[in-house]
Amino acid sequence: MRTTRRELLAGAAAAAAPLGAALPLPAYAQARPLRVGILAPRAGVAGTVGEVGLKGVEFAVEKLNAAGGVAGRRVELVIEEETNPRETVERARRLALQERVDVIQGVVSSGVSLALGPALEESRILTVFWDGTTQDGVNETMPRPRWVFRSTDNECEAVMGSLMAIKHFRGQFLTVAGINPDYSYGRNNWAAFLALLRRFNIEHRVVTEQWPRVGGMDLTANVAALKAANPDLVFSSLLFADLPVFMRQAHAAGLLEGRKWVFPAAGFQHTALKKEFTPPGMVFGHNTLYFADPQATPLAREFVQWYHERTRDWPHWEADRAFFAMEVWRRGVEKAVQAKGGGAWPSNAEIAEAIRGIEVVSLGGPGRMRPDGVAEQTFIQGLTVHDPRYDFPILGPDRITRMDGRQLQKGPGQDFWRWIAEARFDL
Amino acid sequence: MRGGALLAALAAVAALAAAPPLLGEYRTTLLLPVFGYGVALLGLNLLFGYGGLVSFGHAMFVAAGAYAAAVVTGVWRIESFEAVLLAAAAAGLALALPVGALCARYTKIFFGMLTLAFGMLFHSFLFKFYGLTGGDQGMRVRRPTLLGLEFEELDKTAFLVGPYYWYCLAVAALLALLMWRIVRSPFGLALRAQRDNPRKAEYLGVEVRRTRFVAFLVSAAFGAVGGAMLAVPTGLADPELAYWTHSGTLVFMTLLGGFAHFAGPLLGALAYVLLQDWLMSLTPYWRLLLGAVLALIVLACPQGLMGLPALLRARLAARRRRAAAPHPAPAE
């Protein structure tokens, strides 16, 4: 059955109604559109990640505008590319000073966010990051941000993956190995895994640590080293295009059989990890969006379908991060507008203040922006199964675990490593 | 400096000094990397254009300057930008002493490959030594004071497009004047002589290796000062600054402006920054177009933008000569 454009728009408007109609808001229909600047990688190792995030933004804006915009004002996107820190700071300045955007959203790389955060904070530019919050240096660079809102910590998935490994594989392994990307994110994830093994008094022995270059496509030496070490369990936070390459090479070398595998961040590559070289029974992290989530909201199901129709692929978590950023900003704007009582449009300072403590339901589940400007979202991981409907592994419907960000992320002002040592974890 | 060149330089500095209110905030911020890269490229071109030595690792000195700025402002908590510039020059020289002592023994592809290797070694050091350098996350560069003034009342954008802009313009102008004196000095003459015919230069009493070594040191100091100037607007020193692709970008800028002209690198920095800004706003495929521009320059205008007027004049003259020449009589 073909759907006409009119029917599609009517359906989109109906589905988006809860987004815009929850609060009685004064109309600013005659005002100029709100301009949202987006910074996303569009090439290189994180290029596909950026493209999925852009789809999440596109979907969110389509829904918002179909529902009458944000507080009666349409939303326009201005997209710039995230590259290295210096260039991305320049692109952000272009968005703020030349394009006069009302808010900047986006960013995947921690290296970029560490440069961009202080630069935008010092320039008083309202910003909501999608991603890029690896621990090191984040607290030092922006102790009490007023204008910049950070994403949930990058290490959340490693904490959850480690807890999942302990829950499902306890007593089934003694020797462990790690193959993690050679930068702060990979090193922190591996350190967090080992810290949690110690925390739960899991007897273990590290037999090898492999640190391939991010985006490096020849991992045969790492595969050989893992094979020689013969670990019972392998923990890997590989997450870019190097992950499918590693799996192919590991499969060819016979490394995959007879071991436990923990991949807390593999969701970035889920559709590229084909069944012929990706075994069932792995701990597999989908971060904040699992495309086949049986408990997904109607909005999330609609997005997955919308995405699939346009790309013939299934989305991953960067789409949810982008949707979440747009949603907390929208809610902040509407809250600030309502607080003004229909008078003048609120300032960015008032919107920033209104965003603190906002609760939203994003595509992957409920989340919030903490009063200290750090996001908390719902994380989804599980054990993989081979399902005839897909040529890549999905999560077994009865082996899916959901955890709220509060259980996976340090509290305001806390040190990550001290938090891991002292927090109460519920397996 | 000849009268015409002096006047042109003064006019350019005056125009740049008066530019911020006309350009607006964003375009003014775009000129900040032009000043930083301009200084670094003046140094690079001392080796490349005047010394005939193409360095593919020069970004290491830019990175050294940026990390010096991070250490001075972030670790030592010294906020003076004058101290930052001095520390950057010292860091560049300290790095260039051992590297230059080895590289100055070689020329052509061997010099290029050695500088590339040392550049990547330095990148690996910055990337791997987390405790010292912050690894892939780099080190924060805090906002400095200028001549002891804090400008606390200005947010970062106002600081950058105001006092910092004029300060960097002045630094770039002074260093350009210094480089002009260097290339016009007997040392500059010796450097050109060893480029054109090293054996003959040695017969004439030029100490070729020492000349190359000193040029390497000066070049490194300029690169590091340029790196420090670049780091303040970004607010971060990160290992990508030392990556080989950044060294390639520096060579690209020099070729774009014209390595055979003193002002070529300055024009190259300006043209590259504006071209990249325009292309990035235009299309996600901007890298492809930048590559096409580089290919076009090498093929059609090897003297770069500074050589373009002379190239056009020569082509016009050749066309006129062809038009004026009597047509040969048809063969019987």
Image (spheres, coloured by chain):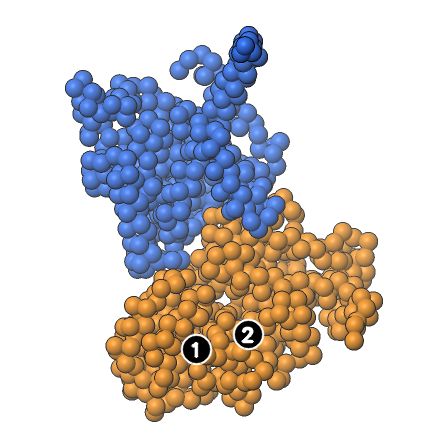
Image quarter in which the N terminus of chain B is found = top left
Disc 2 target residue: A288
Determine whether B277 is above or below A84 in the image: above
Q: Nearer the viewer, residue B295 or A268?
A: B295
Q: Residue at x 67, y 55 (%)?
A: A77
Image quarter in which the C terminus of chain B is found = top right
- Residue A417 spot, x, y in % from top left: 37, 73
Between label 2 and label 1, give the one nearer the viewer: 1
Chain letter for the blue colouring in the rendering: B
- Residue A311 spot, x, y in % from top left: 62, 67
Q: Which mark is residue A221?
A: none
Determine whether A156 is above or below B248 in the image: below
Q: Amino acid at mark 1?
A: Phe
Chain A pictured colour: orange
**At numbered mark 1, what does the secondary structure look like: helix, strand or loop?**
helix
- Residue A106 spot, x, y in % from top left: 57, 59
Instruction: Please rate how many residues cluster around mark 1, counting C-alpha atoms within 10 Å: few if below 14, some from 14 to 19, many from 20.
Output: some
Disc 1 target residue: A277
Q: Amino acid at mark 2?
A: Thr
Q: Residue at x 50, y 85 (%)?
A: A385
